[in-house]
Amino acid sequence: MEADAAKFIGAGLACFGMGFTALGLGYMFAQYLAGALRNPSAADGQFGRLIFGFAVTEALGIFSLLIALLLLFAV
Amino acid sequence: MEADAAKFIGAGLACFGMGFTALGLGYMFAQYLAGALRNPSAADGQFGRLIFGFAVTEALGIFSLLIALLLLFAV
Amino acid sequence: MEADAAKFIGAGLACFGMGFTALGLGYMFAQYLAGALRNPSAADGQFGRLIFGFAVTEALGIFSLLIALLLLFAV
Amino acid sequence: MEADAAKFIGAGLACFGMGFTALGLGYMFAQYLAGALRNPSAADGQFGRLIFGFAVTEALGIFSLLIALLLLFAV
Amino acid sequence: MEADAAKFIGAGLACFGMGFTALGLGYMFAQYLAGALRNPSAADGQFGRLIFGFAVTEALGIFSLLIALLLLFAV
């Protein structure tokens, strides 16, 4: 396999990182929403923590996208 | 393996990213709907957060589609 | 591997994206139906949101189908 | 690998899409039946939505079958 | 890899589709039986829906079997 071919397969594999990140985010928001609908008066107080958890999780998906784009255009 | 062949396999692998994103979205909407049917009066107040979570999760699936389309047509 | 062979394997891999989307949709409808049977009077009010969630999730499966068909017939 | 060999492996991979679709359908019917046995009087009113969810989910499995048959006989 | 070898690997991969279908069916019957044992008087009324759900889910497993048999004997 040449180096050019390996770049493209690597970019495809990097999409797994985005997919699993989205699965984790989906689970996080799902449980927050389920809890917020059970106890709506407390939901506002926990929203800041949801945003914090979302930001650090989404970052990993963005890192996967960065690797995919670096593989396609930079290296 | 030539570079052209690797592009097509990479595009196929990128579809895993879309699939796992859809799995995460399905889980998020599922838990929201289950909670909303248990406590319908609070459902409207949490709908904005569902949309926020949906948007940032769907973005990761769109990034996977972007990688797949870049592999097929751009690089 | 030649480019023609890689197209066919890529199309097969793209079917994983459709399968995981269907798994997510199945979970979404499952939780909606379970909730609707527990509280039937609220089911009509949440049906619009089910349709919204269904549409944005199904879109990711259709994107996978698009990649598979592009691999077979367009590139 | 020659193109003919890749078609057969691609058709085998496409069966994963059907399998995961069946898993999603199984979950959907399971939760509907569990709910209907808990509250049989409401089951008839939600049956139309079950059929709707079944149809749009089954479609993704049929798309996978389409890709597999295209790989075997059309391309 | 020659085309004959790929047929046999493709037929093996197609069995995953049957396996996941069986997992979905197992879950469906499990939840029906759990519900029917909790409320036996309602079990007869939902049996028709169980058969309907079983038939459409089993179909996806039969499609996988079809692909496997086509790979072995027809193409």
Image: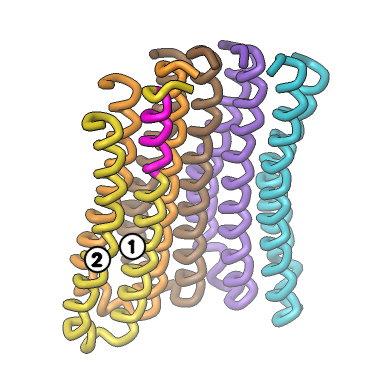
Chain colours: A yellow, B orange, C brown, D purple, E cyan
- Percent across and percent down for residue B1 are 50, 19
Q: Are marks 2 and 1 on the same chain?
A: yes
Residue A56 image label: 2
Residue A25 image label: 1
Q: Earlier in the sequence, mark 2 or mark 1?
A: 1
- Percent across and percent down for residue C66 are 40, 27
Q: CA distance from mark 2 to mark 1?
A: 10 Å
> Does residue C62 appear in this view?
no
Neighbour class for label 2 at 10 Å: few (<14), some, many (≥20)?
Answer: few
Which residue is located at x 66 percent, y 52 percent? E53
Secondary structure of residue under mark 2: helix
- Percent across and percent down for residue C69 are 45, 22
- Percent across and percent down for residue C45 are 31, 66
Type of amino acid under label 1: Leu
Camera-side residue: A41 or A32?
A32
Q: Is residue E59 magenta?
A: no
Residue C53 image label: none
Which residue is located at x 29 percent, y 19 percent? B73
Neighbour class for label 1 at 10 Å: few (<14), some, many (≥20)?
Answer: many
Number of on-image labels:
2
Camera-side residue: B28 or E57?
B28
Q: Residue furthest right?
A: E73
Which residue is located at x 63 percent, y 66 percent? D33
Q: Is residue A6 magenta?
A: yes
Which residue is located at x 38 percent, y 62 percent? A24
| Residue E12 as seen in the image, left or right of residue C47 | right
Part of the protein shown in magenta: A5-15
Type of amino acid under label 2: Val
Say which chain tag 1 marks.
Answer: A
Task: Quadrant for the N terminus of chain E, please.
Answer: top right
